[in-house]
Amino acid sequence: MARSPATALLVEAGAVLATSLDPRTTMSQVAKLTVPELADLCTIDLLARDGSIAEAAVAASRPGVAEELEALRASNPLRPDGEHPVARVIRGGEPELRAQLDDATLRLFAEGDAHAAFMVAQRYRSATIVPLLARGRTLGALSTLRFADAKPYTQDDLALVCELGRRAALAIDNALIFSELQRIEQRLEAVLVNLAEAVTLTDESGGVVFANGAAAELVGASSVSELIEAPPGEIARRLLLREESGAEVVPESLAGARGEPLVVRATVRAEGEERWLLIRSCPLADPETGRPRWSLTVYEDITEVKRAQLAQAQIAHTLQQALLPSELPEIPSVEIAVRYTAAGELNEAGGDFYDVIEQGDGRWLLVIGDVCGKGPRAAGVTALARHTLRAGALAGLEPLAMLRLLHEALRRQPPGADLCTACLVTLVRDADRTRLSVALAGHPQPLLIGTDGWARPIGRHGTLLGVVEPLRVEERSATLSEGESLLLYTDGVAEAGRSHGTLSEQGLIELCAAGRELSLSALLASVEEAALLRATGPRRDDIALMGVRLLTGADR
Amino acid sequence: MDDARLTIELRQESDRAILALEGEFDLGSVPLLERELESEQVRGAAAVVLDLSRLEFMDSTGLRTLLSAQASAAERRQAFAVTEGGEQVERLLRVTGVAEHLRIIVSPDEALA
C-alpha cells in the first residue's frame, strides 16, 4: 500500500528531527519540509524568555519571500498581546485554522502598513497556526500559509500540521535543552580550565580523563594532553604524596569515598620540589548506571599558608619559652609543682605567667600573673611583666616596690590600657618553719592548704597594675608549716567556661579538701582537670597553677 | 561564634545616659559597648551610668573597657558611675581593686552629686 502524503511527511519529519541537536538547524529543516507540498510559506516563531515573540525559521516556495518576511519580523515584531494569529495561538495554546483569508482580515492582523502590504501582495489565502507545546510549555507557534489560488486548508490539514508541530516541538525542546547543557558545560569547563586550583578527573584505572592547566603544572607535565594521553597511573608516577604522618598516599585511591579534605606533602618526583597540598576528592557516578565511575580531585596549594603556620608556631613556641621558665630552681625541703594550659592552640603565647626566683639568704620569690587579652600584644606585655618582676627581684627590690615598678612600666606602654594582675609570694626558709609574705595586685588570693586539706585564702586584695591610680597594694604574712601547701592560680582556673558554671574559689577549696591525700602534682592535676572540664566555651582563659608544699621530716 | 551574649540598652534620663548591660561582657562583646560609648547620646550626656545589675560575667577585657569608659568620661568632664553587678562581676571588681576606684550606686537613677 502506498503511503499517503501526510504519512510520508511525518516519516520524513521523524528522520529530519532525529538528526540535529542544534535548535536553529532543527527549526529550519521542519519549516522546509512543508514547502511546497503543504505550504507556500512556513514560519516558526518562538516565545522568548522576556515574553516577546521572535521569528526563528522561515521557508517559502518562491525566492525572496522568506528574506522579506524575516526583515519584516525584525523591524515589526509580533506583539505578544496583538491580534496576529501567531500571538493568539501562543497565548491560548489552541490551534487555529484560517481556511479563507481576505485582505481586510490580513490588515487587521498586520503589525504596521509594510506588513499588511506584504501579506496582501503575497496574496495570503489560507493558513493553519499550531502551538509548539513540549513538556507542558508553549515554545512558540508553527504556521503554514497558502497563497493566491491554492486549495484552502481543511481540518485534515490542520490535524497534520498539529502532529508535525507536536513532533517538532519535542525536537526543538530537546535541542534547546541540549544547547543549554552545552553552554553550561562550556562555562564549567572555562571555570575549571582557568581555576588556580589543580583539578583532575580520573577513571577507575587511574587514567586522566580531564585535567586543567594548573594540574599539569602541579605534576610537572608540559601540557594537559601529555597527562591525558599517558597510560593510567600517571599522576602517581609524577607526584609523591605523603600525609603529615609520613604515610604515602596514592592519588588515585583518594577518590574512593567522599571524605574529609586531606593535607599532604607533595613532591614532584622529577624535580624534588616539595609543596603542601589540600586535597579534596569525590566520586562521580556514571549517570546511566549510577555506579561510581570517575573521581574528581581538587588540589589546592597551601604551601604558603603552611609555611606561615609553621613559622607562627615557631614564634609562639619561642615566645612561650621566654614567658615561662624552662626549669624551676630547687628550694630545700620544698616541693614545687606547676601546670599551665594556654587557651586554644593559636594562643600558645597566652597571657598567664609564673616564675620562681632565688633571692639568696634563704629567700625565694614565687610569681604568678595574668595579662589582659590574648595574642601577640598580650604576649609582649606578658614578657614585659615577667622580666620587669625578675629584674626587680634580682636587684633586691621588695615585693611592693617590684609591683610599683611593673605598674609604672605598664603605664609607659603605648596607649591601649594594658592591664596585668600579679601575686608575689616571698618564701623565707627558717630552721623549723617557713614564713610567707603575700602581695596581691588585682590577683585572686592564693590558698593555704592545711595537712587536713582545709584551705583558706591568704593576702589582701590590691589594685591591678597598669591603669588605676593610686596603686594600693600591701603585704600580709602567713606561716607554712610542715606538710602544708600553698596554691597559686590565675583567673582562668576560676572562670574557665563560665557559661557552664564556674569553678569558684569555694569550688577550689572543696577540691583541696577532697584531695588532701593527693601528692602536690596530683592535686594540681585534679584542679586543672576540674577547670578544663568547665572550660568548654571557645573563649576560655589561660590556666596557670603553681603549688608549693613544705615537706615533712619523713619526706625529706 | 556567638557574640550576642551581651545586650546593651541605652536610655536617656534627663541629662544622664544609662547603658544597661545584660549577659556576658568579654573579649567578644567588648566592641558592642565601645560602639555605644562613642554614640552622640553618650558623648553629649552630663553623666554616664553603666547599669551592671543584669551582667552575669565580665572578664579582664571587659574590665579594661570599663576603666577606659571611666577615663573618657573624666576627660569629657562627665560624671561616671556603675551599679552593682552579679556575683562574678562584683568579685572581679573587688579582687582587682577596681571597686575602690569606681562610683558604685544602688539604682541607675540615683543622684550623682
Image: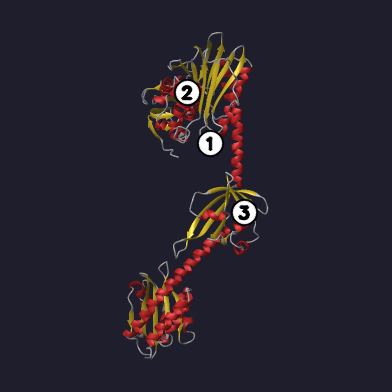
Residue in the foreground of this view, choosing between A20 and A227: A227
Please tell me the numbered disc located at residue A523: 2
Classify residue A302 as left or right of residue A96: right
Q: Are marks 1 and 2 in contact (CB under 8 Å)?
A: no
Please tell me if label 3 and label 2 are on a single chain. yes
Query: Looking at numbered disc 3 in the image, what kind of residue is underneath it?
Result: Leu
Q: Secondary structure at mark 1?
A: helix
N-term-proximal mark, 3 vs 2: 3
Task: Pinpoint residue A218: horizontal percent, then vertical percent.
Answer: 62, 54
Quadrant position of the N terminus of chain A in the picture? bottom left
Query: Looking at numbered disc 2 in the image, what kind of residue is underneath it?
Result: Leu
Mark 3, Cα crowd under 10 Å, few <14 / some 14-19 / many 20+, is many
Task: Pinpoint residue A200: horizontal percent, then vertical percent.
Answer: 56, 58
Query: In the rendered structure, the residue with mark 2 lies on which chain?
Result: A
Please tell me if label 1 and label 2 are on a single chain. yes
- Picture quarter containing residue A513? top left
Residue in the foreground of this view, choosing between A5 and B12: A5
Q: Secondary structure at mark 2?
A: helix
Mark 1 against mark 2, which lies toward the viewer?
Answer: 2
Residue annotated with mark 3: A239
Query: Looking at numbered disc 1 in the image, what kind of residue is underneath it?
Result: Glu
- Identify the residue at horizontal 35%, vertical 69% (top origin): A136
N-term-proximal mark, 3 vs 1: 3
Residue in the foreground of this view, choosing between A532 and A519: A519
Q: Is residue A299 visible?
A: yes
- In the rendered image, the residue lying farthest to the right is A271
N-term-proximal mark, 1 vs 2: 1
Residue annotated with mark 1: A345
Give the spatial CA distance, label 3 vs label 2: 52 Å
Q: Secondary structure at mark 3?
A: strand
Position above or below: A531 against A60: above
